[in-house]
Amino acid sequence: MFNCNPVNWQLTVHDEKYKTPEWFKGGVMYQIFPDRFYRAGEEPLKHGILRKWGEQPYFRPNGEGKVLNNDFFGGNLKGVCEKLPYLKSLGVTVIYFNPIFESYSNHRYDTGDYMEIDPNLGSKENFDALIRDTEKQGMRVILDGVFNHTGDDSRYFNRYSNYPSLGAYQSTQSPYYDWYTFHGSRDRYDSWWGIETLPAIKESSESYQNFMFSENGVIKSWLKHGIGGYRLDVADELPGFFLKMLRKAAKDQDPDAVIIGEVWEDASNKIAYGERREYFQGEELDSVMNYPLKDAIINFLLSGNTNRLREVIAMLIDHYPKATLDSLMNHLGTHDTARILTVLGGKSCQSKEEMAVTHLSDSEKEAAKELLKMGAVVQFTLPGVPCIYYGDEIGMEGYCDPFCRGCFDWENGDRKLKSFYEQLGKVRHELIDIFRDGIYREVYATRTFLLYERRSDAGSAYIYVNRGTSQFRIKFRGEFLEHLSGTKYEDGLLVKRGEYGILTRI
């Protein structure tokens, strides 16, 4: 009947009552890797090796070929409390913490006890003080939920007998035994991606479900402490039934709790482990980490071509429910990726030995910062919630793990770049009624230039970025304010090479 191939398109079906927390939209997120942000006081470590602040994290394997991840720099919850005014200056409304539960390693994705704060970070009293202080600053806290696996050195598995409880590794009589899957002997068990220090959880275990979702379970307990929600590690590896139970427990405790999933692709049509995911049908997630947009922005900055960015923006708008679109975690890098400045600097490395000693030259760094500013303008003005990875706002460098997890450079950070981020946060706050849920419209685009509008009942903002060498004239009637520079324009402006801006009518 047809002699041509139809264009692929998608219609996403979801519960008509599906909504996401209003408080989350329009804000600014800030991701903190707790051990590396700021150390307040000189309290000794409760475990691990204490390093001097600013030294390079250990990356070489030991004699057994293992990287132990047991070096710590002493960042703690008190340190975050002391730096809340700094975060406030950036316009931060949401702090997303990498794991803070008791664990063996510095990254803490090997949970030892879900109900305790890692003693190297502080205590529950310190955490409650942090929650009180963030609320005073108009901020909320989101915790990293690592519910697909635990550590082997945990209260539940207890491979090394470091906990008084009877762990699954120790005995079939352990109350946690059915959380895990063993194969004939205690040394043969399912683990996350074959990493033996991360035994995999069997989410179908009723005991585990009760531990997570009961009235005094993990999910509700930390919400009772005042957190604003969870970011779910490896959401693709959590079964749909488990996500539905998690969402119900969270929303029963706090209907405004936000649930964000770690998903690296288009989450609206994802098939993971043979299962068609139902993230956005109304019973699982509120939002996901927006890796497709991150990759598209980087592609635009490095190639100078708008095509991929425009395609991804259109895909997100077409595929994602509006409530999700306005809640997307829009980042340019995380603890799992090379730092954005390093990526934009364009120096590739083949080995960690090379990564450890490679840095951008002064000229390369300045060029990368200019690209970063343009990328941040896009990040802060598209639908969703921008998230700053700690230190990116002062120009920190670093290749992949562990180099992207260095100590925050409080003494030598780029103050001009930080001021630029402050201005972005200020503009986002001033225009929150537009950026919270305003629709997106592409106004004009070429291969290297993009002009788009965000519009709501409160008005319109026009954002332009010019990655090419040509100049473009934007014509309009009346007087407009460009918010980043504070410049007023009447009846149009000429956008030169490398320029960007945010315009509203005066």
Image (cartoon, rainbow, N blue to C red):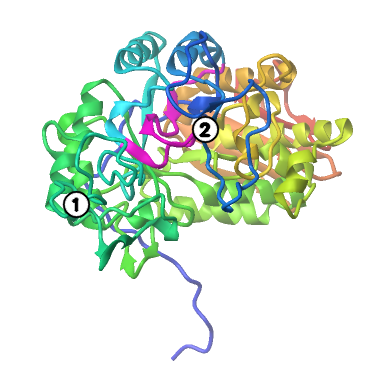
Mark 1 is surrounded, within 10 Å at the Cα level, by few (under 14), some (14 to 19) or many (20 or more) other residues, namely some
In this rendering, the answer to whether 251 lies above or below 282 is above
Name the image quarter holding residue 361: top right
In this rendering, the answer to whether 132 lies above or below 192 is above
- The disc labelled 2 sits on which kind of residue? Cys
Mark 2 is surrounded, within 10 Å at the Cα level, by few (under 14), some (14 to 19) or many (20 or more) other residues, namely many
Determine whether the residue tagged by mark 1 lies in a helix, strand or loop: loop
Q: Is any atom of residue 479 visible in this view?
A: no
In which quadrant will I find the N terminus?
bottom left
Whole-number angstrom distance, CA of label 2 to CA of label 1: 44 Å
Q: Is residue 107 left or right of residue 67?
A: left
Residue 422 vs residue 168, the one in the foreground: 168
Q: Is any atom of residue 163 visible in this view?
A: yes
Q: Which label belongs to residue 171?
A: 1
Residue in the image at 35% along x and 13% along y:
126
Residue in the image at 27% along x and 57% along y:
239
In which quadrant will I find the C terminus?
top right
Q: Tell me which label, 2 or 1, sits earlier in the chain.
A: 1
- The disc labelled 1 sits on which kind of residue? Ser
Residue 248 vs residue 400, the one in the foreground: 400
Name the image quarter holding residue 501: top right
Magenta residue span: 90-112
- Which residue is tagged 2? 387
Residue 483 x %, y %: 65, 20
Is residue 105 shown in magenta? yes
